[in-house]
Amino acid sequence: MDENEKKEPETAQEPPRPEDYSRYMGTLNRIYRRSNNPKRKKLGGGITSLKKGQQPAAPAPEPGKKDRSFLAVAGGAIVLMALLYFIKLL
């Protein structure tokens, strides 16, 4: 008989040892320090991330009023194109 074939089952099993996480603690501490850094600039802070002296964007127009700021941009583009066209003709 081979000694691998016949093994007597162990009657007294040892309780499982608790895991040793000490080797992971350096990594966990580094991740914790990075994610909880209050000085770090957070993305998407919005209005709260504005520095002193900066103004937020213009407010939305009141209901019932039309926003016509695009007309100024469109008019400026047309004038610029016309100016370039006439310079090209000269």
Image: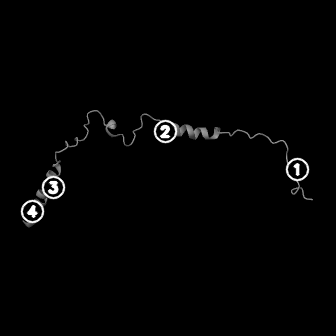
Residues under labels 4 and 3: Cα distance? 20 Å
Amino acid type indicated by mark 3: Ala
Q: Position of residue 84 (x, y in %)?
A: 12, 61
Answer whether labels 3 and 1 touch (C-beta < 8 Å).
Answer: no
Give the left or right position of residue 31, taking residue 48 as reference.
right
At 56% from the left and 39% from the top, the residue drawn is 28
* Disc 4: CA contacts within 10 A as few (<14), some (14-19) or many (>=20): few
Amino acid type indicated by mark 1: Glu
Residues under labels 2 and 1: Cα distance? 53 Å
Give the left or right position of residue 48, taking residue 38 as reference.
left
Amino acid type indicated by mark 4: Ile
Residues under labels 2 and 4: Cα distance? 57 Å
Residue position marked by numbered label 4 in the rendering: 87
Tag 1's secondary structure?
loop
At 13% from the left and 57% from the top, the residue drawn is 80
Residue position marked by numbered label 2 in the rendering: 34
Task: Tell which residue pokes out farthest to the front in this image.
Answer: 64
Tag 4's secondary structure?
helix
Tag 2's secondary structure?
helix
Lower sequence index among marks 3 and 1: 1
At 85% from the left and 44% from the top, the residue drawn is 11
Residue position marked by numbered label 1 in the rendering: 8
Quarter occupied by the N terminus: bottom right
Give the left or right position of residue 39, taking residue 23 as reference.
left
Lower sequence index among marks 2 and 1: 1
Lower sequence index among marks 2 and 4: 2
* Viewer-nearest of discs 2 and 1: 1
At 8% from the left and 66% from the top, the residue drawn is 89
Mark identifier at residue 74: 3
Residues under labels 3 and 1: Cα distance? 90 Å
Answer whether labels 4 and 3 touch (C-beta < 8 Å).
Answer: no
